[in-house]
Structures are given as structure tokens and as C-alpha cells.
Amino acid sequence: MTKDFILNEILRTARENEGKALGTQVFFNATGIKRSDWLGKYWARWGDALREAGLEANEFQSAYDIDYLCERYVELIDELGHIPVEAELRMKGRSDKTFPSHTSFARLGLKNERLSLLAEFCESRQSHIDVAVMCRGAIQNSLPLPEQQENNVTVQDGYVYMIKSGHHYKIGFTNDFHRRGKEIAIELPE
């Protein structure tokens, strides 16, 4: 595999791609030229190979703006008529190449944070008030009721202990300190 051959393939594939250079994985898929055929032999970086071929190095895609992500998410809620689950975000991304990847929406936070942010986004623009109401309602439905919170709390009497053995510590909880001490003594005879 010669340097000239690789440069010619870079140029050929770029011409077929409307003058834009391919990334390393797409280039490999199109030509069969592996990274190991050029990396460390002719160039230290793929951008160096592209520049030597007379092309501009590819740039990483920057992160989407939070407002843009909110706009696209709200559009999908309008389209579906409900708050999408992750699988629906994936499906939309696959069917619409202009729609951000489902992973991009992680920047909006976890479920309740995301819903709160979307509600604030809609309310601040006085648009999609129905989506804001839907988001606020979903937040309320996901919060446990105060009486449920109190009933789920169980209080158990016992001891929290810390035992040192050599350079190691054992921290735990037991309701019978003497029994637990004997069990640990069997496990750690020193």
C-alpha cells in the first residue's frame, strides 16, 4: 500500500462525495484501506493525509444548542401527541436525518429535569402551551404522594459498625452486633 495510492483514493472518494473528504471509517468501508495502512507510516492524523491530498480536514460536529434541542423535542411531542420514550426518539432520528440523535437529548437532563426545562421553554415563548401543560402534568404524576412517602419509610433498630483488619476496613449495619462480630472474626481470622 503506497502513499500515492492512498492519496489517489482519498481524492477519488472525495470527488464521489461532492468534494467532501470521507471520515476514516467510511473511507475504509469504501476502499478497504485500513487505519493501520497509513497511521504512523505516512501520517500521524487523518487530517494530515487530507491536507496533503489538497482537501480540508474534517471538523467534529459541535454540540446542539439547548434551545434547538428543546424546539425539536417539542415538535416531536406535537407530532406524537404525547411525551416520547427513548425508542421514539431513536425512531425519529433514523427516519429524519435532520433530527438530533437520541443521545443528544441527554443534555436536557433526566426525565423530570427534561420535562421541567421543556415546560419552561414553552412558557417563556408563549408557544405550545399544551406541551407545557402536558410536561407539568407528567412531572406531577411521577412524584409520589406525601402519604406514600411516609408509608414507605421503615425504621429498623441496629448498629452501624466499622472494623479495621490490616489496611482494610469493613463498614456495615447489623441488628445484632455480637453475632456479626463473630461472623466477621471467622471470615477475617487476623
Image: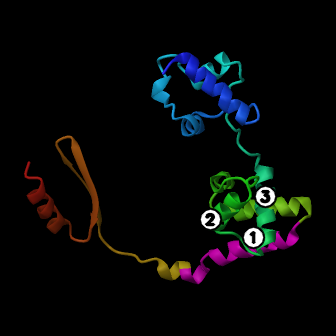
Tell me the kind of residue under disc 2: Glu
Tell me the kind of residue under disc 3: Arg
Label 2 secondary element: helix
Instruction: Using the numbered discs, state the Cα–Cα distance from disc 3 to disc 2 in whole angstroms.
Output: 14 Å
Residue on which the image places disc 3: 72
Residue on which the image places disc 1: 135
Magenta residues, as a range? 128-148
In the rendered structure, the answer to whether residue 118 lies left or right of residue 144 reads right
Front-most of 48 and 170? 48
Residue 131: x %, y % from top left: 81, 70
Front-most of 160 and 49? 49
Front-most of 139 and 8? 8
Front-most of 107 and 41? 41
Q: Quadrant of residue 76?
A: bottom right
Instruction: Using the numbered discs, state the Cα–Cα distance from disc 2 to disc 1 in whole angstroms.
Output: 16 Å
Label 1 secondary element: helix
